[in-house]
Amino acid sequence: MTLRLEQVTLTHGDGDEQVHALDDVGLEVQPGELVAIVGPSGSGKSSLLAVSGALQTPNAGQVEVDGVDVIRASKAERARLRRERIGFVFQADNLVASLTVLEQVLLPRYLQGHRPGQDRDAAHRLLEEVGLAHRATHRPHQLSGGERQRVGIARALMNDPALLLVDEPTSALDHRRGLEIVGLLARETAAHRVATIMVTHDHSMLEHADRTLAMEDGHLTRAH
Amino acid sequence: MFLALRELRFAKGRFSLVGLVIALVATLMVLLSGLATGLVDDGIAGLRALPATHLAFDEDADVSFPSSIVERDTWESLAEAPGVEEAAPLGNTLFNARTDQDVPVDLALFGVEPDSFLAPEPQDGAPLGAEADGVVIAEAIADQGVEIGDRLSIEVVGLDLTVAGIAPTGTFGHVPVAYAPLDVWQQAAFGHSPDAADRASTIALRLDDGADVAGLDAGHGTETVTRSESFHASPGYTEETQTMQMIQAALYLISAVLVGAFFVVWTVQRRQEIGVLKALGATDRLLLREALGQSAILIAASAAAGLAVGSLLGSLVGDQVPFSLQLGPVLSSMGLLVLFGLVGAAFAIRRITAVDPLIALGGSR
């Protein structure tokens, strides 16, 4: 099991103002599985990603990523976990403005201490997989929204992650391009045997998911 | 420096602008350094040219040339004292003189005994003592059209001098030095007072390395300082150096604040990107190293450009302005400029550590 959440509770604020972002959430995701989580904004979807991605520590419960107990891990160990075992695809415009497409994809390896340029071949292969080999020397401001998300996916896969966390990948795209991106995510999930969680508020983007769950007021339930 | 260099290239407009301002500060710094060295040198070059290691002042004079008067007994006794190779009286007074053509000439009149070790060796003309009222003048006076054989009159004391020779005697208190025989100087300084012949301003000394300076002072009622310490006794020297140092300190501060302010804005602008990098597992250490390296490149390159422009401008400065670029002071002021800039940058860059990687996730914004 790549990701295991057990009885995870995350609260914001205190006293009467206390809000349960996550309320007794349990979730398991296997390698090669694409799990979609739908829900309105504020339902706790992002908190689920933050906790799964070792960005935020829950108030209670168990979080295990690729065999690592995230709750017990230090700040440095969590950064290392993100660097080496987790891939993130954020919402639009989360590329580094000064880097070319190829350099974006090389970035995770640089953060691991590799010399830039050492992993060019692997980066080129990933760009071919996402259909952007011809854009390798372009910068983010020269790309369309869909192309940016493809770069984000290639970047997230560069460190051979066990867990891929995808935050609203279609929010800046029209329907057709959105579906293309989700289709790409499904293919890459299978090809790289990575456990993928995709968070979205768009119910029309679920056809490629192996499993769909719904998030509402911090509760995770089967989708209806 | 993977990120730092690419950012420099990507945002070259913004970096060039702040770089330009740093370069202008550096240019100003170079010009100021040249002016400081030149100006200070203009105040004390005549002292530096003295073949003495130390100068002895009257102990009550507070190491000041105008207030110090020493007596013949003192210099004669000092000349015989242990550790003293040479001791000779030195008179030192600023005068306004006029040439035959009625052109006013300022001079720092140095009175020395013509047979002492202080007597200048003229490049042109006759040495001191060849004529009773003959003086050896600095080249700067000759440049004003004064020639050998001309008369210089010091009207205020009613004394006429004859230009006997020309030598590189330097300046004192921004005024060219003219050497006169001690008795001529005594007459100029003290008139016909009966004690005049036994007086000088200070005593120039050549001391052995291990000489007991405190012992000499105690025995003779003098206060002996090294030649370079005596620069402070030169009129305006301390004030000039302090003014220059204050302006330089202000420029260092400006450099620190300027670079700091730029990197505060730059870091705040990149907050989202820094959050993304941290979410991808970038450590604070790596991000700080990148940012500090980036500021170091920016500041060093700008300072180098400013140094080049400043040196070029400095070489165009004419003889009218005392300007002298010395490698040591220029490089140390550039070094401090870069250092202060880095301190400013470091303060700004610190806030990288406060960025929460959570901001990379859209929903939690």
Image (tube, rainbow, N blue to C red):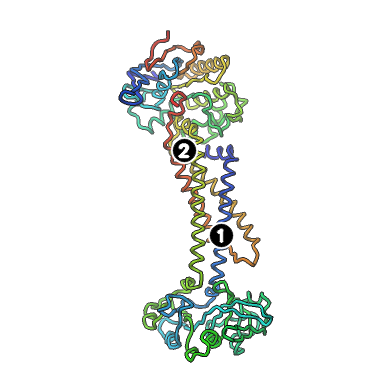
Q: Which mark is residue B287?
A: 2
Type of the residue with mark 1: Leu
Question: Can the viewer see residue B39?
Answer: yes
State yes or no: discs 2 and 1 in contact (Cβ < 8 Å): no
* Residue plotted at (50% across, 32% down): B273
Q: Chain of mark 2?
A: B
Residue A204 is situated, as x and y percent measured from the top left of the image, at 51, 11
The residue indicated by pointer 1 is B32
User: What is the C-alpha distance between the residues marked 2 and 1?
Assistant: 36 Å
* Residue plotted at (61% across, 54% down): B308
Q: Chain of mark 1?
A: B
Q: Quadrant of residue A217?
A: top left
Q: Secondary structure at mark 1?
A: helix
Q: Mark 2 vs mark 1: which is more N-terminal?
A: 1
Q: Name above or below for residue B360 compared with residue B175.
A: above
Of B324 and A1, nearer the camera is B324
